[in-house]
Every structure is written in structure tokens, then in C-alpha cells.
Amino acid sequence: MAIVKLNKKASLGTAVFSAVSLKLCCWGPLLLTGVAGISGSSVYFSWLIALKPYLLAIAFLSLGVAFYQVYKKNKLGCGNCETDKPSFFKSKIYVWLVAVFVVTMTLVSYYPQIFNQTEGNEVVIANQRDIQSVKLDIEGMVCQSCETNINNAVNKIDGVIQIKTSFEKGVSVIEFDSTKTNINSIKEVILSKGYVIKKSKNE
């Protein structure tokens, strides 16, 4: 009986760990940059992108094992087993809560646009000649969540008109009002998110 309980705990723990690891490529750089002040830390987590399908499979397989162990019928036929009330962390409710967490982490990892809608700023343009566009080559973007992180952060800058980022191409094109912000301010925001800017080019 102790082995079954240990396996259930291990299954749920593995499912949670694998689900959290799906977002580690995004959260890791933010923590290292924000807490330790290590800029460009996103490159240290880029290798995780290749493991995401395997982490996803491990998370759901472990979750399946946990569900099986919780819902399987008692074949021992002992009368006292029915009177044993499991603790919350061994209950069906807890397993379902873990399942919801794993599904949520999966959606956040693979479909970040569902939770983060990128909206452009409404900028009043006094002179069209003040509008500039810059193309930044960014290293460390590994998924759509990286695109969303950069777009949302840059869009908060006063004077940014629009931004289009592609993690597949490793570039971000930003259009902004030069009277309200500048390229260096935009770069600082992107660097603060843990990414590396290799070069920039005015368009």
C-alpha cells in the first residue's frame, strides 16, 4: 500500500514539474534578469524548446497514472479500507486540481495569445517625419510566448506605435514616435526581459 501511495505522489509531482518546465524557457530569464541582474539570460534556456514535446508527454502520462491510481477499484476486498478517509493531497479533488494546472500551463505555453492580447498604442502623430522604424535582431526567443513578452513590454512605452515580432526569424520591427521615445529606451526594455539584441537597423 505504501508503494502505491508513493507512486501516486511521484506521478503528481512529475506532472507538476513537467508542466512548470514548459514555461521555464520564459520564466527563467525573467527571474535571472530581475533577481540576479543577469542580462541576456534567455540564451541559457533556449535548449528547453526541444524538450517541450517530451515534457508535455511526461506531464500527461504522469497525470494518467495518478488518475488510474485514484480511481482504480479496491481489489483487496477488506472492509476496513472503506473507512479510511484519505487526506486532501491523496484525494480525487487534489488530482483534478493538478490536472487543471497542467492543462492551464500547456495552454499558456503553446497558446499564449489566449491569455495575453497584444494591443497597439494610440499615438497622436503631430508630424509624420517624426515616425521612425527600427529592426532589431534578437537572440533568445524560442516560442510564441517570447513574442508576446516582448510585444507587451515594448507596447507599454509611450510613443511606440506598433511592433511586430517573430521568434522564428529572431527579429522585431518597431515603429515609434521619435519625439516621445528612442531606440535605446526600446532596447533597454527588451534587455530587461532577458533577451540579447545582436544588432539594430533603421528602416
Image (cartoon, rainbow, N blue to C red):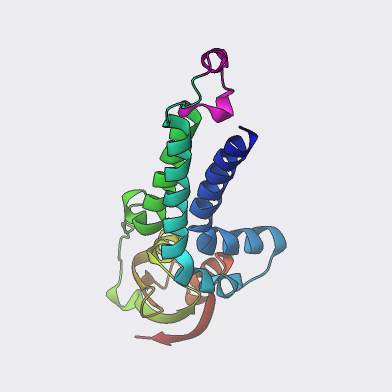
Which of these two is toward me, 17 or 114?
17
Does 154 sit above or below residue 178?
Answer: above
Q: Residue furthest right?
A: 36
- Give x and y (percent) for residue 91: 51, 26
Apparent side of residue 196 relative to residue 50 in the rendered image (left or right): right
Q: Residue at x 51, y 25 (%)?
A: 76
Examine the structure image and report whether residue 140 is included in the region drawn in magenta.
no
- Give x and y (percent) for residue 72: 42, 31
Which of these two is toward me, 111 or 115?
111
Q: Is residue 94 visible?
A: yes
- Give x and y (percent) for residue 37: 69, 65
Quarter of the image where the C terminus is located: bottom left
Quarter of the image where the N terminus is located: top right
Q: Residue at x 42, y 50 (%)?
A: 60
Task: Read off the magenta span.
Answer: 78-92
Which of these two is toward me, 102 or 187?
102
Q: Residue at x 54, y 60 (%)?
A: 24
Does 183 sit above or below residue 121?
Answer: below
Q: Is residue 150 visible?
A: no
